[in-house]
Amino acid sequence: MIERLKSIHCSSKNMLDKKVRQSVACEQSCHKLLTVIALLACLLILSLLFRLIADEVAKLLDLKAKLGEENGCPHKLILKTPKGTRDYNPEQMALRLGVLEKIIAVFKRHGAETIDTPVFELKFISIVLILTDRYLLVTQDVLTGKYGEDSKLIYDLKDQGGELLALRYDLTVPFARYLAMNKISSIKRYHIAKVYRRDNPATTKGRYREFYQCDFDIAGQYDPMLPDAECIRVVSEALQALDLGPYMIKLNHRSLLDGVFAACGVPQSKFRSICSAVDKLDKSPWEEVKKEMTEEKGLDEHTADLVGNYVSQSGGVELIAELRKDKELMKQPAAVQGLNSMELLLKYCDIYKILDKIEFDLSLARGLDYYTGVIYEAILCGDDVGVGSVAGGGRYDNLVGMFDSKNKTVPCVGVSLGVERIFSVMEAKLANKGMKTRTTQLEVFVASAQKNMQEERMKILVDLWEAGVKAEHSYKKNAKILQQLQHCEENGIPLAIIIGEGELAKGEVTLRVVSTREETRVSRNNLVEEIRKRLGALSGA
């Protein structure tokens, strides 16, 4: 019996061991299977990634080929700037910075301070206007509602995280938003920054899609025409400082234009659109402007001819007297107000000694909708580059109120200088004269006449830098002396310090005037003083 039980026990144990071994083997098989499946999944994912990468590379290569073929050069990518933009090389940037420095000096002379605003603005903002005892939520268009027909030139941006944005078209509307948002009621500010217009560029005439504007504005409640006259004086000073040649500043008044339109029978609903058409008279003949008025704007031909008779007139103080004889025009309160304002403005321009640079021109309209009073535009006379106006501006008393929840107005008047057009004129003038612009302000070049003198050059350099002298040396240890001196001549560096073992032993250096090649031995202890003396003499010459 016992033997039988032992036999059964052994048999059971063997069966159990067998099942355990089978279970372990099964588990190992499953583990191997899962490992294989995981490896296959990884390979599949990698295969998909490689396929996606290959597809994207193929698309890029196809795009590259198309770009090359479009530019007449198959299978070659042509690098270029976007339409209406440009790069500036060091010489162009030196000229550009020189222009900006002169303009900023004029702005500061008149007591202006500067600000900056974002390059893009909200396309729409919600503001609350208080009407009697009710709150009315209104969607206010920050950019596109302020420029009239020019709003089609604004660069819209796609939805950026729930905000509809647009690149700024000018610096005036952002300035008005800045005043309203910060509750500022008076400021004299200048602002120099890039603006963007989706226009048809004419780069030879200085008209781009991306360009700088230089704005000077006076905001605040002041007596009539005092800030306006100073803005015109600022324009005159800036153009004089830039030495662009003869110029003329054209003046007009929006109220006078409205009075003219009313006297001619233009419906009030068409004032702004007709004003926009008149604004093109500086670029298009009257026949084309009249055609736009009648065929596109819906104005009858007789009314258009009456408008044409007025906007063809220009002059000075005598034109005001002539217009006051017009009985139909004097029936319009807006015209009377405009003429009175113009008379006062011309009086102040005479006091500011700029009356000889002023022309009262009834064809000047400036198409932007936010202007409410005097408007002006500066043009170059006898300009063979043909850039058109180089500055413009006017009064805009209601723009800030459009952004204020209580419609609180802050009267403003300002001017904007077209830097790109000014830059084009100056660049052309320099090219005609064959003149070269220095791209650095270096005053001294430290040269060595012998080998292994770089450490001595560096010791002199650091002394010059600490003394505020603009200096450099060659980054080659053993540069040839002729190459170093040629570098000075080619880059207009006025002075060169030449060191050698003999000079160093005596505690001296050779100071060379690059333009005359005159050389003088100078003690190291008196080197900075002697450099300043020579630089002063050269600048005086």
Image (cartoon, rainbow, N blue to C red):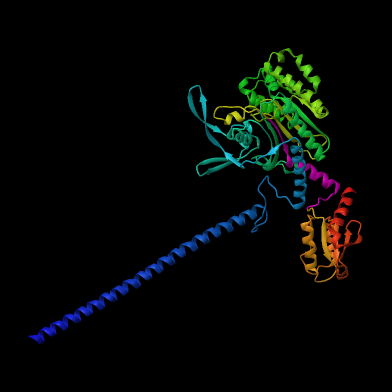
Q: Residue at x 39, y 67 (%)?
A: 38
Residue 265 seen in the current view: yes
| Residue situated in front as seen by the camera: 390 or 513 | 513
Q: Residue at x 52, y 41 (%)?
A: 163
Q: Is residue 103 magenta?
A: no
| Residue situated in front as seen by the camera: 14 or 118 | 118
Q: Which residues are magenta?
A: 413-439
What is the quadrant of the N terminus in the image? bottom left
Q: Residue at x 82, y 47 (%)?
A: 431
Residue 485 seen in the current view: no
* Residue lying at the far bottom of the rendered structure: 3
Residue 333 sits above or below residue 138 on the image: above
Q: Position of residue 105 (x, y in %)?
A: 76, 40
Q: How many marks?
A: 0
Horizontal placement of 320 versus 433: left or right?
Answer: left
Residue 136 sits above or below residue 483 on the image: above
Q: Quadrant of residue 251?
A: top right
